[in-house]
Image (cartoon, rainbow, N blue to C red):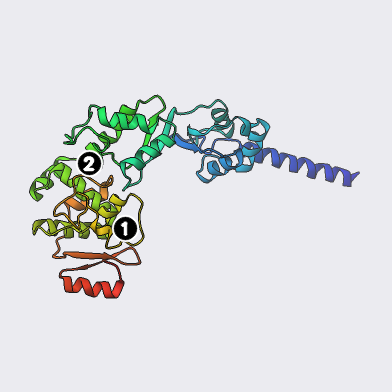
Amino acid sequence: MRKIKGIIFVVVLIICLLLGWWRWATLPHAADSPAASEVLTVTPGMNARQVAQELENRGFIRNATVFLILAKQQNLDASLRYGDYMVSQADSPQQIINKLLQASWTGEVRVTIPEGYTTEQIMETISEKGLCSKEALYTAIRAVPLDTAVAIDAPADEHRLDGFLFPDTYFFATQETPEEIINKLLRRFASEYTKEAEERLRSAGLSLREWVILASIVEKEAKKAEDRPVIAGVFLNRLTIHMKLQSCATIQYILGTPKAVLSTKDLEIPSPYNTYLHEGLPPGPIASPGHAALQAVIYPADTDYLYFLAKSDGYHAFAKTYTEHLQNQRQYGGN
């Protein structure tokens, strides 16, 4: 009899411990303190198990297994739709599941545009999110009244806003029009054009458009943050003495499809964007520069360098004279 009572006691104790653990695991992670809401992105193909692990990793729930058990009981996998959801550590696992089941969606789509993307790549990125078609976006570019403090002097064609569609992470409402989407990117660029930036450009003798054009070249040339101001300094030095920029990035822009090694024939392509043939800046930006590249142009390194070449580690070797540049070529290879 004592043995049976002992077994029953152990079983009851285990059940109590399991119930206590279950109750603990199903409570909000931060029930006693206010917690800010954050976006949980459910991507296409994601299942309940992956969602549970993501929630645990980010500290929204205490235990992924408990969340998954609840989710399986309510067949979350069958109802799970991709999108952005607002969740908080103040939410219990069941409350989060309810949001996912009820499609308590923020109504917004997150779009990340990397630095150095061309207008074409930006249009593809936005259209792939299902917000609108590339054609509709290009129509907006050609026709949109520019809702921005920045006056962009460019013809009304598909290249009108090249370089001014600022790379960043955006949240677009699903009902936003193509014009509203384009203007949101333009307003983000406008925030870069501060009074200080305007004064720096005036001192450097650069227009707004020239700033963006040069920054776009720096963006495509520089792989390392430390090199950006130095590369900007090199190009500004060349512009000052009327020396051709000879930027490989402009040739890659002409080609459209990047090449690992440019040929002599590539450098002779007859295009106004070919900075090996034409002195000065090309007629337009070759990509959308980010904050760091824009800053590098208005805060360039104070240097006498006139040459640079890319090394295998991503950094650049700089030189003041052509003789030094040839020495760098022999040491590191490249053009």
The tag earlier along the polypeptide, 1 or 2, is 2
Residue, disc 2: 192
Q: Which residue is mark 1?
A: 223
Q: Quadrant of the N terminus?
A: top right
Q: Amino acid at mark 2?
A: Glu
Q: Tell me the residue at 20%/55% (across/down).
A: 275
Residue at figure coordinates x 53%, y 43% from the top left:
54
Mark yes or no: residue 13 visible: yes
Question: Amino acid type of disc 1?
Answer: Lys
Q: Nearer the viewer, residue 67 or 307?
A: 307
SS for tag 2? loop
**Which residue in the rendered view is the most extreme toward the right?**
1
Q: Residues within 10 Å of mark 1 (few under 14, many from 20)?
A: some
Q: Is residue 35 visible?
A: no
Closer to us: 34 or 196: 196
Q: Is residue 265 above or below residue 105?
A: below
Give the percent coordinates (x, y) of residue 177. Answer: 35, 25
